[in-house]
Amino acid sequence: MTRRGKTSPVGQKQTVRCAIYTRKSTEEGLEQGFNSLDAQREAGEAYIASLKGEGWVCLPDRYDDGGFSGGNMERPALKRLMADIDARHVDCVVVYKVDRLSRSLMDFATIMGILDKAGVAFVAVTQAFNSGTPAGRLMLNVLLSFSEFERELIRERTRDKLAAARKKGKWVGGTPVLGYDIVPDGGRLIVNQDEAARVRDIFALYAEKESLRATLREMERRGWGTKQWTTRKGRERGGKPLTRNGLYTMLMNPIYVGRVKHNGSTYPGEHEPIVDPAIWEQVQSLLRRNGRSGGRAIRNKGAALLGGLLWCAACGVKMSHTYSERRGKRYRYYTCFSAQQRGWHTCPTKSLPAGEIERFVVEQIRRIGGDPKLLAEVLRKIRDDEERRSDDLDRERRSAESDLKQFAAEVKRIARSIGKDAKATAQMAEFQGRISAAEQCLVEIRAKRAAAASEAVDEAQLAAALRDFGPLWDSLPPREQARVLHLLVERVTYDPVKETVAITFRPTEIGALIQEGAA
């Protein structure tokens, strides 16, 4: 086994600095005085002590990942270990078993590549092998293949077990829902009588008001929110105001009529229902009719020139097109999404008359063609955007070319070790795939550059397009007007505090507008 330790005086053993890495997939039992991580570390310390005569010493730093899966490398202690290896603070990594380091063959190969590059040895206490020989590396890959197979088998068995439990109507875990508590030993729901009465009132409120927003307003007035509960570790959860989506999900949950849902089907549950089936069916019928958007007061039908373009500056969210009808007359609005979700008092904008804001935006676009200063400003912003896009594409091209060069060098290096290294063939296939992806990326970048060059707009073209915008606009039907506006404008932002409207153009589509005008 190749080791790189601290320099020692002549005649003495080199010091081999050993880092012990431990891992446990779940947090269960970690609160105990002596847990699985401690047992793994104790075994590693005993192994290192047995080789004290060869200069092995145990580093005091602990690299413990409790509650982290071995199926990926997103583990804090593993990242610290890799950083210390890179800083040349570690000569040997000791684990209890190979699968403690990783259960993924690809991740394990990556980790071993890092260890090999740094000259760091790898030891599993209960699985004797030498990572410095081809046979040892082959044994590592065999062991890890079985670990990965075991992980997939456990995942499949767990999924099948949960499905079987659902079909039997059992509670299989998750966030507690309003109206029910989980029994202390888990696995079963019991009715929380106070919350159950509130749930019945919420269903009755929606059946009466036929509107999610109106129901939310009444819930907020009464001080009702999400279920408040305490985790096993004593942390408080929930107790927050419901959003519209949260209310919709709650009203759709079949758990309240004594059923559990799995893969689109429902099954009789072991728990007691708390909502009358007749009220439940009435609410489901209203939800199907009104949809997730709300109810009678919120609809989104008809042509909307600024649909998807208008934003509320105060809340930083989009405004959706809605309308209501009174005495046979239709009134259109753009309503802030935050106001819809959390209540009118949360947003200073609330809603805008659709006709007024649409006419204002169109009028501003008409003005640009006849105002040289505005035209010059639009052209400057287009040039800035074109330059920014060009710089981004250049950076992407340089990065792809650098990757391609690096991958090609790796392929040449791996080709020399085929027949000597058991991992060489798999590594060769991996880097060939990376080379193909980098080459495809370069092709796409060239296509983007060509498209950008063809879309470049000069001042005369822009002036002609915006000058002809008025006649073109007046000749189009409403749906075509909406399409042209979306072609030209990227975003319209209304600021209720400053009472201003900012229009952001879509410079890359100006060429398409010019072609529309020519046609």
Image (cartoon, rainbow, N blue to C red):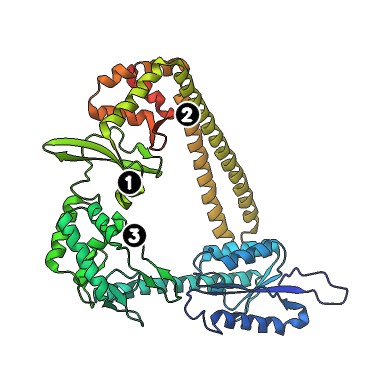
Could you say whether the residue bearing mark 2 is in a helix, strand or loop?
helix
Q: Which residue is mark 2?
A: 452
Residue denoted by label 1: 337
Residue 241 shows which numbered tag?
3
Q: Which of marks 2 and 1 precedes in the sequence? A: 1
Q: Amino acid at mark 3?
A: Pro
Tell me if residue 249 comes above or below residue 157 in the rendering. above
Please report the residue visible at 14 percent of the width from the left and 69 percent of the height from the top. 276
Cα separation, mark 3 vs mark 2, equals: 47 Å
- Work out how far the residue at label 1 is from the one at label 2, CA to CA, in angstroms: 35 Å
Q: Earlier in the sequence, mark 1 or mark 3?
A: 3
Disc 1 residue type (three-letter): Phe
Closest to the observer, 243 or 133: 243
In the picture, measured across the screen, residue 20 lies left or right of residue 391, that is right
The three-letter code of the residue at mark 2 reads Ala
Of helix, strand and loop, which one carries label 1?
helix
Distance Cα–Cα, label 1 vs label 3: 16 Å
Mark 1 and 2 residues: CB-CB less than 8 Å, in contact? no
